[in-house]
Amino acid sequence: MNRAKLARQVLTALSNCKENGCPHHAKAAEQPIRAARLNEFSSSSSSNSSKEYAFEWISSTLRIGSGVTAEVGMDVRNLGAKKTMVLTDDGVSWTPAFLAVVDSLKAAGQKFDVFNRVRVEPTDTSMLDAIEAARCGQFDSFVAVGGGSTIDTAKVAALYASNTDADFFDFVAKPFGKALTPTKPMLPLIAVPTTSGTGSETTGVAIFDYEEKDCKTAIRHRCIKPLLALVDPLNVKTLPRHVVIYSGFDVLCHALESYTALPFDQRTPRPADPSQRPVYQGSNPISDVWAREALQIVSKYFRRAVNDPEDVEARSQMLFASSMAGSGFGNAGVHLCHGLSYPISSQVKSFRSEDYPPDHALIPHGLSVVMTACADFQFTSAATPERHAQAARFLGAKIEPSAKAEIVGGALSDLIKGFMQDFRVPNGLSELGFGRDDVGRLTNAAINSLSALQISPRQHTTDAIAKIYEDSFTVY
């Protein structure tokens, strides 16, 4: 088609738009083209005009490949950084990944200080420690080397180092914090993940344990996603067995929860200002792609990655699945598995896990998440059985799309139980040290955490949450 003909067609189309009242354009030829107003899109067939009609997509830039960690020095130099804060935890500070970061920064002539006091499963206290160090050090850039605990801590440090007048709870999600929008952007953060689970390198979320409330909570803002993530398979080759298991369960639940979350266009209320759209928006066509791919990778490679430390392909694939699931849930969100996990890990009594720091009682995040997963998906399957059935098929289940909800919920539960049993993880809340008299305390804390995760496909009551905990004392 020649350009003249194409131009005539465009002009004709614009003219038709104006005559037919297209909301993007003026109705009279002499009026200027104008932007549509939000209320012009609200007259849908739905009787609930406050429902959402759009979703936004955010993610960090990912650089993926064996050896990309060695490029971090050049990346920091390219930022024009003068002084960098490198965050890690004591267990990672001797690993090849951390040493590669240090060597790269030195080779690039970059000035940096190391903060190695990151707490595995961070608390408000440990976050405040990192914030103080970041503010006092007058850093202009940040590098996180570690798992989700380190990356989340680095996000918070970089955010509050920029917003120097902010109180800690200004940006914390409700009901514990004020959920204010930061007035200044987070300082540049480069994430170097060393576990294959949290997906924190892709998201605008930082989780911590609010010790006073016996529950985890979060800071959720688009502005706290890392500027760049270096996803390097070399960094997960030597992961200990239990870290592979529990981080893998986190991938599994991220993907399942984001795929089965309430669809974005059923979420209410729609914000009056697009800048107020939540980070967790509900399932959407883009998050579905990432969740589907992550589930298929988990089905094929999870057991291999756990059972054979020398299986480089499997461990690399689980790392990729972590970033894929992170890209998905970082926009769609998570619901019951994570909402109910926060009190479990916060209210730990004496449990300790092999391959994790022995200096304090700790329930690894992925373990706390999978503890209620079987009961969670049996509960939510009743709302959207076809959607849950599709998720089960991605994991390898032979199940018909029209199967009844109880069949679907049972199939998903059996898949999760199979992984748990094969890996010999603790069999339910009872083996984590909880008793039946803890259900009320767990439930009350969970109601608080779930208030900020309003994308469950099925509405829950206090009694329903209590029953899920009750059903999770023995899992397999």
Image (cartoon, rainbow, N blue to C red):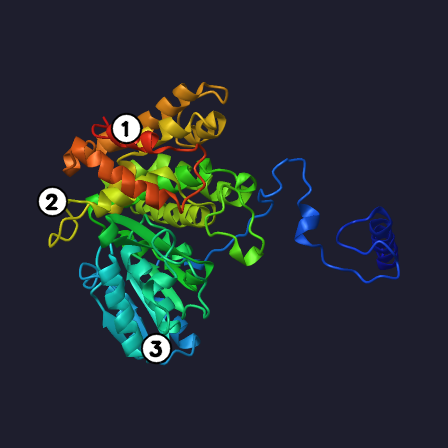
Which one is nearer the viewer's eye here, 410 or 215? 215
Seen in the picture, residue 393 relative to 121 is either above or below; the reply is above
**Looking at the image, can residue 235 be seen?**
yes
Q: Residue 377: horizontal and vertical position, in percent?
A: 37, 30
Looking at the rendered structure, which numbered label has been put on residue 350?
2
Q: Which of marks 2 and 3 is nearer the N terminus?
A: 3
Q: Residue 193: horizontal and vertical position, in percent?
A: 32, 57
**Looking at the image, can residue 96 be seen?**
no
Q: Which of marks 1 and 3 is nearer the N terminus?
A: 3
Q: Residue 246: horizontal and vertical position, in percent?
A: 25, 43
Q: Residue 268: horizontal and vertical position, in percent?
A: 53, 43
In this view, the mark in front (2 or 3) = 2
Q: What residue type is labelled 2?
A: Ser
Element under disc 1: helix
Seen in the picture, residue 440 relative to 187 is either above or below; the reply is above
Distance between the alpha carbons at the discs numbered 2 and 1: 26 Å
Quarter of the figure with residue 389:
top left
Name the residue beneath numbered marker 3.
108
Q: In this view, does 281 lie to the left or right of 96?
A: right
Residue drawn 24% across and 42% down?
A: 344
Figure quadrant of the C terminus: top left
Element under disc 3: loop
Distance between the alpha carbons at the discs numbered 2 and 3: 45 Å
Element under disc 2: loop
Q: What number of labels is visible?
A: 3
In this view, the mark in front (1 or 3) = 1
Name the residue beneath numbered marker 1.
418
Looking at the rendered structure, which numbered label has been put on residue 251?
none
Residue drawn 37% across and 73% down?
A: 165
